[in-house]
Image (cartoon, helix red, strand yellow):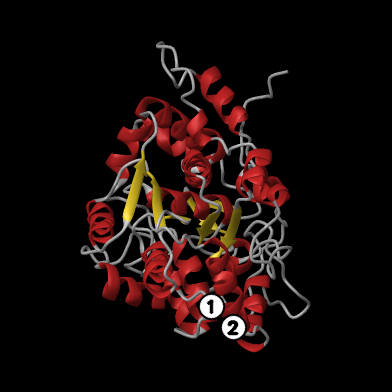
């Protein structure tokens, strides 16, 4: 039986209707799956405090070395797959695995919709720093259609990119017989979400699928087909396979393990920026800060990425500046007062520079774009005031 077409991000239906903000950082309780305790502190802040006070990082380093010793190739063949965009975090991980721990990484990138100039330059610099690399690009016509479906029906144009980004490294590992895949951080623990796997180096496979595949691929494909986004030409056989996780039984038969590097090393994005700049030639955004925030060194590879965060602002009432400031408050780089000021100044800024690029990629006009955006504004988050949409509650008022 074919499922009904998607009409809204399922996460939006589970949000609390009273908006609150963390007493320590600037994060909202509208972030899906985040928890707030009796003192009004979010789960991400509590986890960050735990990292500083109770985690034995020396013990975690010994655990990491034991894991790598188990998988290290004596013949010099590939022994770990590193999902790698050429950004600061994955560049740091790959460099440390190769030059600090003596591993032989195969770095794998699932291509974003449209590379930014600085993003592609950083990827080339990373490869030239001495890394074996594989770039996997999906069928352009299929990817555009599924990107459009994600935007119109989920308010998330990156939904299909996330599927490919998570699936392709496992497919490559399976094809090469590589038994270790090293991802970056547990986003649920680091940024606010489910704490179920906060103290584990990796999730169970069923938890992995729940975290990263909450919207079924087949459901998204059927939605795009019913809407006619693929056009009149038939879709090539197997064009969707690139977005699918390999069967878990095959991964288990190989003995493949997936781990988060952040379980073994304290996750501090600003330090990753300095490390990657020094060791792999990583450069920050030459245009200065990224639209919608004050930072200049995060997620630079995708020219459409700002619309992921703009739609996050529309759907949940907080944007990229909130996300950046919250983490930097937890890391001790800025105060909450400074974070609040940054959120007030930059959060929800419309990505004017990349707007024409985004519209062209999804095949929409500006007149078609805005009604799609507005259908994702929840009434407990937004109100119309003088013909303008305004947040009902903010961290700075």
| Residue that appears at 74% across and 81% down | 39
Residue displayed at 47% across by 31% down:
146
| Residue of label 1 | 266
Where 222 sits versus 84, above or below? above
The C terminus is located in which quarter? Answer: bottom right
Q: Point out residue 192 in the picture as x, y percentages from the top left corner.
A: 62, 66
Q: Nearer the viewer, residue 320 or 376?
A: 320
Q: Is residue 361 above or below residue 204?
A: above
Percent coordinates x, y for residue 227 in the rendering: 51, 20
Pointer 2: what residue?
57
Marks 2 and 1, how far apart at CA: 8 Å
Q: Are marks 2 and 1 in contact (CB under 8 Å)?
A: yes
- Of residues 166 and 153, the one drawn nearer to the viewer in this rendering: 166
Viewport quadrant of the N terminus: top right
Q: Residues within 10 Å of mark 1 (few under 14, many from 20)?
A: some
Examine the rendered structure and indicate whether residue 261 appears above or below residue 141.
below
**Element on which disc 1 rests:** loop
Q: Which mark sits nearer the N-terminus, 2 or 1? A: 2
Residue 2 screen position, x and y as percent? 68, 19
Residue 240 visible somewhere in the drawing: yes
In the displayed structure, does residue 70 sit left or right of residue 50?
Answer: left
Q: Check disc 2 and report its element: helix, strand or loop.
A: helix
């Amino acid at each position: 039986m074919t499922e009904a077409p998607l009409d809204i991000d399922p996460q939006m239906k589970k949000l609390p209707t009273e908006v609150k903000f963390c007493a320590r950082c600037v994060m909202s309780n509208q972030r899906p799956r985040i928890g707030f305790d009796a003192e009004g502190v979010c789960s991400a802040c509590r986890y960050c405090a735990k990292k500083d006070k109770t985690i034995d990082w020396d013990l975690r380093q010994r655990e990491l070395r034991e894991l790598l010793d188990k998988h290290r190739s004596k013949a010099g063949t590939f022994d770990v797959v590193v999902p790698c965009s050429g950004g600061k975090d994955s560049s740091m991980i790959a460099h440390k695995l190769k030059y600090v721990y003596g591993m032989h990484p195969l770095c794998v990138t699932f291509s974003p919709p449209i590379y930014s100039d600085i993003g592609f330059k950083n990827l080339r610099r990373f490869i030239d720093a001495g890394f074996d690399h594989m770039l996997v690009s999906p069928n352009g016509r299929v990817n555009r259609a599924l990107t459009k479906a994600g935007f119109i029906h989920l308010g998330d144009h990156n939904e299909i990119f996330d599927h490919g980004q998570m699936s392709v490294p496992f497919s490559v590992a399976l094809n090469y017989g590589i038994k270790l895949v090293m991802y970056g951080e547990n986003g649920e623990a680091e940024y606010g979400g489910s704490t179920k796997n906060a103290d584990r180096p990796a999730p169970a496979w069923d938890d992995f699928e729940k975290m990263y595949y909450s919207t079924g691929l087949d459901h998204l494909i059927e939605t795009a087909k019913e809407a006619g986004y693929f056009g009149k030409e038939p879709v090539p056989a197997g064009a969707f396979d690139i977005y699918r996780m390999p069967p878990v039984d095959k991964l288990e038969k190989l003995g493949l393990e997936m781990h988060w590097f952040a379980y073994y090393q304290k996750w501090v994005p600003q330090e990753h920026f300095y490390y990657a700049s020094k060791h792999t030639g990583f450069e920050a955004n030459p245009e200065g800060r990224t639209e919608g925030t004050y930072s200049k060194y995060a997620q630079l590879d995708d020219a459409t990425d700002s619309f992921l965060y703009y739609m996050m602002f529309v759907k949940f009432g907080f944007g990229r500046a909130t996300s950046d400031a919250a983490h930097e408050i937890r890391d001790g780089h800025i105060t909450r007062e400074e974070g609040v000021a940054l959120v007030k100044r930059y959060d929800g800024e419309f990505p004017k520079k990349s707007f024409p690029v985004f519209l062209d990629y999804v095949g929409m006009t500006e007149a078609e774009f805005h009604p799609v955006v507005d259908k994702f504004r929840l009434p407990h988050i937004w109100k119309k005031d003088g013909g303008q949409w305004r947040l009902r509650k903010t961290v700075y008022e």
